[in-house]
Image: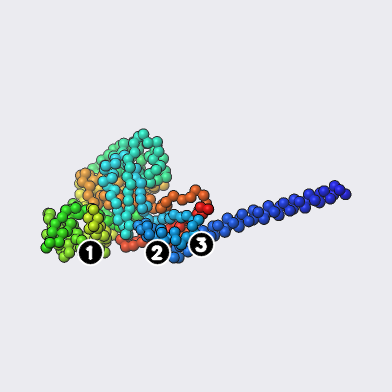
């Protein structure tokens, strides 16, 4: 009888232990679910409060203070953006002076894209701290660091179309065609990011020189576009003047012959341009122009050739002067080739082309580092304007710190 009672007691104890442990684990599960739901509620409330103004986090610090006032003190956050270029792009290169010259700041839809260019050498064991590599006349495409990098991140090679280096041709899967090489003039192809962002980034013209009209001080600078030299004048009142002449300009930016004011457009050299921004008070005194037409064509020279390839998915942009830009497919999707100007002259068109190639290579990114633990993302689609149409998937990335 005692043995039977012992068995009964043991069974009852086992049942009680199971119930207690079950309650403990159930409580933990509820806590985890509640935590995620609570963070999602914080993210949705912040989106409902700020709406489309959330895009101000790209340019203004005040909105971060406003967010901090509304969120719980024990919640931290950052943002993830999908569908628009990264705000700060870390570029690694083998030729720092040349590539830095190509990658000045870009201005797009009211925000700047900054290119942080740093050089690397054969002594660097890893290139993983860069977002993208821009290689200029690189002579070692068999470098395992570069090949490994291209498996995860973009590699842009700027090479002369006359280059016969086997490593360069193999890396970008390029092959020559035609003897002699010939090329009909090309415009942009449709439906690709690089065309879109070339048009959206447009041209930035520095206006460092000074002249006076009727006692008023104005700034002006040279704009080389389509193998033509133009002068751009800006005034403290935001007026812009564009003309083809030699310095000093004869037009008054406050009463322009060709030009206007911010968000106005004008015709010049068979293209229509938008005046995006006039930064008279900035140290560089810059004028920011966008391209209104979607068929902008470079100048052409039928005597100049280029490299074609049957192994690439698309020619993204091309002309006789700059040859072509191609993006690989399948295992080569992160490899982009840009030919150098054959005459060695680098104007704003070419700089904008390189900037667009780099900018569109990073379209999914976090504003800051996230917590290594458990996070939750709450997303909304936010439109940007007004240079080109952009829609970004913007996510609040949230986590608890205590």
Q: Tell me the distance, in whole angstroms, between the alpha carbons under discs 2 and 1.
A: 26 Å
Total of numbered circles in the picture? 3
Q: In the picture, residue 204 is in which quadrant?
A: bottom left
Kindly identify which residue carries mark 1. Answer: 261
User: In percent of the image, x 23 and y 46: which residue is there?
Assistant: 341
Q: In the picture, residue 112 is in which quadrant?
A: bottom left
Please tell me whether mark 3 or mark 1 is closer to you in this view. Answer: 3
User: In percent of the image, x 26 and y 42: which residue is there?
Assistant: 97
Q: Is the residue 182 above or below the residue 259 in the image? A: above
Instruction: List x then y, in percent, for residue 155.
Output: 36, 44
Please tell me whether mark 2 or mark 3 is closer to you in this view. Answer: 3
Q: Residue furthest top?
A: 123
Kindly identify which residue carries mark 3. Answer: 41
Q: Residues within 10 Å of mark 3 (few under 14, many from 20)?
A: few
At mark 1, the secondary structure is: loop
At mark 3, the secondary structure is: helix
Kindly identify which residue carries mark 2. Answer: 52
Instruction: List x then y, in percent, for residue 264.
Output: 24, 65
Q: Is the residue 100 above or below the residue 247 in the image? A: above
Sequence order check: which comes first, mark 2 or mark 3? Answer: 3
Q: Residues within 10 Å of mark 1 (few under 14, many from 20)?
A: many
User: In percent of the image, x 44 and y 49: which residue is there?
Assistant: 369
Instruction: List x then y, in percent, for residue 248.
Output: 12, 55
Q: Tell me the distance, in whole angstroms, between the alpha carbons under discs 3 and 1.
A: 44 Å
Q: Tell me the distance, in whole angstroms, between the alpha carbons under discs 2 and 3.
A: 18 Å
Q: Is residue 310 left or right of residue 269?
A: right
Q: Is the residue 222 above or below the residue 264 in the image? A: above
Q: How is the image coloured?
A: rainbow
Residue placed most toward the observer, 372 or 347: 372
Sequence order check: which comes first, mark 3 or mark 1? Answer: 3
Residue placed most toward the observer, 130 or 328: 130
Q: Do the CB atoms of the residues marked 2 and 3 lie less than 8 Å apart?
A: no
């Amino acid at each position: 009888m005692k043995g039977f009672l012992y068995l009964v007691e043991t069974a009852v104890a086992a049942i009680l232990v199971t119930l207690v442990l079950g309650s403990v684990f159930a409580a933990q599960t509820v806590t985890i679910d509640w935590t995620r739901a609570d963070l999602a509620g914080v993210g949705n409330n912040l989106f409902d409060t700020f709406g489309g103004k959330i895009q101000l986090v790209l340019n203004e610090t005040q909105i971060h203070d406003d967010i901090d006032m509304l969120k719980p003190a024990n919640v931290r956050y950052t943002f993830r953006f999908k569908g628009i270029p990264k705000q700060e792009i870390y570029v690694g290169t083998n030729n720092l002076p040349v590539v830095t010259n190509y990658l000045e700041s870009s201005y797009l839809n009211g925000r700047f894209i900054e290119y942080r260019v740093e050089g690397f050498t054969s002594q660097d064991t890893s290139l993983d701290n860069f977002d993208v590599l821009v290689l200029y006349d690189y002579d070692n495409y068999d470098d395992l660091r570069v090949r490994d990098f291209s498996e995860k991140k973009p590699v842009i090679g700027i090479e002369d179309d006359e280059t016969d280096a086997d490593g360069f041709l193999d890396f970008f899967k390029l092959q020559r065609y035609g003897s002699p090489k010939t090329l009909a003039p090309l415009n942009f192809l449709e439906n690709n990011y690089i065309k879109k962002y070339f048009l959206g980034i447009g041209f930035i013209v520095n206006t460092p020189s000074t002249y006076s009209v009727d006692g008023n001080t104005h700034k002006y600078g040279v704009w080389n576009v389509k193998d033509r030299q133009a002068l751009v004048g800006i005034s403290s009142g935001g007026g812009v003047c564009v003309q083809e002449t030699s310095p000093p300009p004869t037009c008054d930016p406050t009463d322009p012959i060709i030009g206007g004011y911010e968000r106005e457009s004008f015709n010049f050299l068979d293209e229509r341009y938008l005046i995006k921004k006039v930064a008279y008070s900035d140290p560089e005194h810059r004028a920011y122009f966008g391209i209104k037409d979607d068929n902008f064509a470079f100048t052409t020279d039928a005597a100049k050739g280029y490299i074609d390839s049957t192994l690439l998915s698309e020619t993204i942009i091309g002309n006789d002067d700059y040859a072509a830009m191609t993006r690989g497919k399948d295992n080569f999707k992160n490899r982009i080739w840009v030919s150098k100007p054959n005459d060695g002259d680098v104007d704003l068109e070419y700089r904008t082309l390189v900037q667009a190639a780099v900018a569109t290579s990073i379209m999914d990114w976090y504003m800051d580092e996230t917590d290594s633990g458990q996070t939750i993302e709450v997303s909304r689609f936010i439109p940007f304007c007004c240079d080109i149409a952009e829609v970004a998937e913007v996510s609040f990335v949230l986590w608890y710190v205590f």
